[in-house]
Amino acid sequence: MMGQLWDHIRARLVNREIIFYFIFGVLTTLVDWISYRVMTRCYGTDYRIATTGAWTAAVLFAFATNKLFVFRSRSLNPRKVWREFVPFVACRIATGLFTLAAMIALVDGMGIRRDFICKIVVSGISLILNYVFSKWLVFRKVS
């Protein structure tokens, strides 16, 4: 009985889509983090502006990779792309606002001066939310 349960859980959690989402999620997170670090450390950008700029770069990268590689939505028809892009960006705006609010709450509200540690924690939560939104709202398979 436990063996069957474990096999069922593993089959649901370890599949091509999840593996690719994880890989491209890590790469998207790196785009976000590297952009953030470059803006804050190299250019002295305020963390709020850097969070927004890094988010924008990550969203554009994530849309392309999620569309083509994770959810295999291959259509390049402008209408279809637009119908995917708009809800994708809307969902990412929601998690982007969550990220910004969480960063402000942790850094300013709680006084945590290790802003990059906060960025790591908040990014993990956003990664999970973004998968759920992409899977069920954006790139859902329609019969």
Image (cartoon, grey):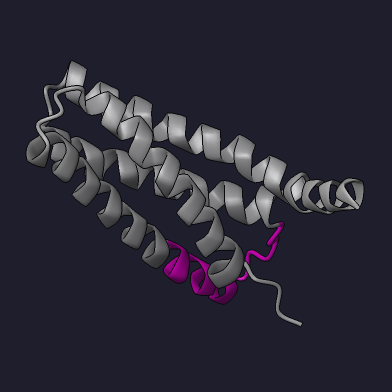
Q: Is residue 96 above or below residue 28?
A: below
Q: Is residue 38 above or below residue 142?
A: above
How many discs mark residues in the rendered view? Answer: 0
Residue 48, horizontal then vertical, whole percent: 15, 40
Q: Please give the name of the residue rendered at 32% of the width and 60% of the height, measured from the top-left corner.
A: 93
Q: Is residue 70 visible?
A: yes
Q: Please give the name of the residue rendered at 55% of the width and 68% of the height, measured from the top-left corner.
A: 138
Residue 87, horizontal then vertical, whole percent: 45, 70
138 or 82, which is in the foreground? 138
Name the side, left or right, on which 36 lies relative to 121: left
Q: Residue furthest front?
A: 1
Residue 104, horizontal then vertical, whole percent: 14, 43
Name the side, left or right, on which 100 lies relative to 6: left
Q: Please give the name of the residue rendered at 55% of the width and 54% of the height, measured from the top-left corner.
A: 131
The C terminus lies in which quarter of the figure? bottom right
Residue 121, horizontal then vertical, whole percent: 36, 35
The prevailing secondary structure element of the residues shown in magenta is: helix
Does 41 lie within the magenta span?
no
Residue 107 falls in image quadrant: top left
Q: Which residues are magenta?
A: 72-88
Q: Residue furthest top?
A: 42
Q: Is residue 49 visible?
A: no
Q: Please give the name of the residue rendered at 63% of the width and 64% of the height, measured from the top-left corner.
A: 76
